[in-house]
């Protein structure tokens, strides 16, 4: 049975749920991760989907627990605040710590840091 948020999906969007990006992750777990993304506006449903992914693949890097995700995004927000305060080096250190901890770059911090470093090189 599809989670509530998935029932409204059709065509390409429904096919997206079955797309495979992790060769080493069970298909059921990957679908549950994607379903969590679809259900982002319903915290309980998103967390239930993430729990389902962890149940199938408890040690896989793509299924971090809620506390870990929260901490990584909190550290990312801290980095943004440091940037706004003009404390670029401290912000870069925070972003580098996230990259070190989030090896699969689930938070997309690696891309953010690359863009910021390019801008620094070009004095933007």
Image (cartoon, rainbow, N blue to C red):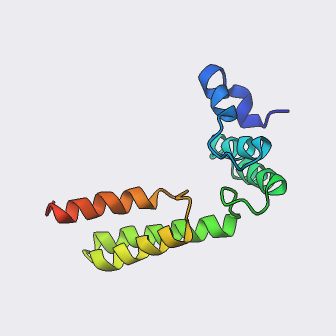
- Residue 26: give x, y in percent of width and height: 77, 46
- Residue 47: give x, y in percent of width and height: 73, 54
Left or right of 22? Residue 45 is right
Task: Farthest residue to the top: give it.
Answer: 11
Residue 29 to residue 70: above or below:
above
- Residue 66: give x, y in percent of width and height: 69, 64
From the image, which quarter does the C terminus lie in? bottom left
Task: Farthest residue to the front: give it.
Answer: 23
The structure residue drawn at horizontal position 55% and vertical position 56%, both measured from the top left corner, is: 106
Looking at the image, how many numbered discs can be counted on the residues? 0
From the image, which quarter does the N terminus lie in? top right
The structure residue drawn at horizontal position 74% and vertical position 44%, both measured from the top left corner, is: 32
Residue 64 to residue 38: above or below:
below
Task: Farthest residue to the left: give it.
Answer: 123
Of residues 81 and 23, which is closer to you in this image?
A: 23
The structure residue drawn at horizontal position 28% and vertical position 74%, both measured from the top left corner, is: 88
Left or right of 24? Residue 87 is left
Of residues 50 and 39, which is closer to you in this image?
A: 50
Of residues 11 and 9, which is closer to you in this image?
A: 11
The structure residue drawn at horizontal position 18% and vertical position 64%, both measured from the top left corner, is: 121
């Amino acid at each position: 049975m599809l989670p509530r948020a998935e029932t409204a999906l059709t065509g390409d969007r429904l096919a997206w749920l079955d797309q495979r990006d992790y060769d080493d992750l069970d298909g059921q777990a990957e679908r549950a991760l994607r379903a969590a993304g679809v259900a982002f506006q319903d915290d309980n449903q998103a967390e239930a989907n993430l729990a389902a992914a962890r149940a199938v693949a408890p040690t896989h890097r793509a299924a971090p627990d809620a506390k870990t995700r929260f901490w990584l995004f909190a550290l990312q927000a801290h980095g943004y605040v440091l940037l706004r305060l003009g404390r670029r080096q401290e912000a870069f250190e925070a972003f580098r710590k996230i990259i070190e901890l989030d090896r699969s770059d689930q938070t997309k911090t690696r891309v953010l840091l690359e863009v910021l470093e390019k801008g620094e090189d070009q004095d933007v």
